[in-house]
Amino acid sequence: MKSVAPGTVIFHRHRGYGVITSVNLLTGWISARFGSEIRTLDLNLGSDEVQHADGEPILFRRRPPDRMPHARLMALVRELHRAGYQRLYMYSWPRPSGLHWRWHLFAGQRNWMERPWREGWYGSGSDYNFNPVLGWGDAPGETAEQLVRTLAKFDPHGLAQALGRDEDHSEWFERVCAALLPNYAFTLGWDRRDGPVPSSLPVIAVRRGITAYDGPALPWPPGWARLWAGPNMAASPLLTRKLPANAPFDAGD
């Protein structure tokens, strides 16, 4: 697919050939100048049938963009689980501001509290809003299969640590993906000021305009209940655990 940017030569069925002067890919609108006209014409890439100069259509997905990559990451992890990399885990939790959600992939031992940090294996929805990539050489909009290949190329040693069996977790993850994808994702954190640990897995929408999740209640991941020392379970592990000195996020972020 060719790039669309100011200076791109386009063809419009009513105006002929022209040049793009500005692009807004968040809304799908462009401005273009045709022939010797001084004024620009505003066009919508989703409905005005704009083409590149060689006749290739310029297509624009009219669905609102994802605010966070969590659903794509879930699809990635599911593909790897099916391929035998069942010791791959996904942790997601809200930033204290409540505006965005962080994500963290880790492999090896399933330890939710002491998770190894590898470059490119973590990120935040706040960064994804402006640069919709995951950080391991992937391109925006890659499918789960493409993301698997780019991750394997980026960090084969890290991915090799995920090779192995964890049937309890992979079966739970498969069930969660079947219920939530493609519009929802799960989070393993909550605000303790809202009360004790919820009885079911918290669910979040990954883009605007999605109705609140009304599907079946989903259980927490296997082994999650054993993390809690007291019967009350009123605090989040995110808010109570001490981050290591080399953690990529500041505790107050």
Image (cartoon, grey):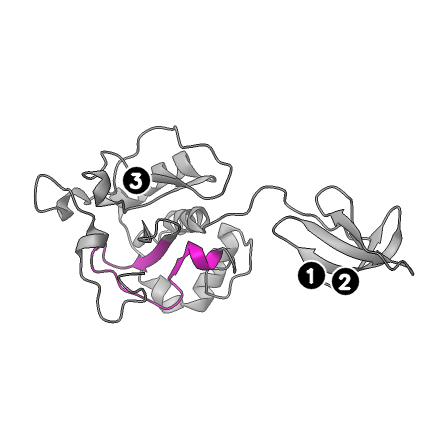
For the residues carrying marks 1 and 3, which lies nearer the camera in this image?
A: 1
Q: Is residue 108 magenta?
A: yes
Q: Which residue is mark 2?
A: 8
Of pointers 1 and 3, the one earlier in the residue sequence = 1
| Residue appearing at x 31%, y 62% in the figure | 161
Taking 163 as reference, is 178 left or right? right
Say which quarter of the image contains residue 169. top left
Labelled pair 2, 1 in contact (Cβ < 8 Å): yes
Q: Which residue is mark 1?
A: 3
Instruction: Give the structural element (helix, strand or loop) at label 1.
Output: loop
Q: Which residue is mark 3?
A: 172
Which amino acid lies under the numbered mark 2 shown in the image of this protein?
Answer: Thr
Q: Please say if 43 is above or below 242.
A: above
Kindly tell me whether residue 162 is visible in this rendering: no
Q: Nearer the viewer, residue 14 or 148?
A: 14
**Image spot of residue 34 (x, y percent):** 87, 57
Q: CA distance from mark 2 to mark 1?
A: 8 Å
| Residue appearing at x 30%, y 40% in the figure | 172
Of pointers 2 and 3, the one earlier in the residue sequence = 2
Q: Residue furthest left?
A: 230
Which amino acid lies under the numbered mark 1 shown in the image of this protein?
Answer: Ser
Taking 162 as reference, is 39 left or right? right
The boundaries of the magenta stretch are: 102-128
**Image spot of residue 217 (x, y percent):** 31, 30
| Residue appearing at x 79%, y 56% in the figure | 32
Instruction: Give the structural element (helix, strand or loop) at label 2.
Output: loop
**Image spot of residue 45 (x, y percent):** 72, 47
Q: CA distance from mark 1 to mark 3?
A: 40 Å
Q: Residue furthest bottom?
A: 246
Q: CA distance from mark 2 to mark 3?
A: 47 Å
Of pointers 2 and 1, the one earlier in the residue sequence = 1
Q: Please say if 105 is above or below 167.
A: below
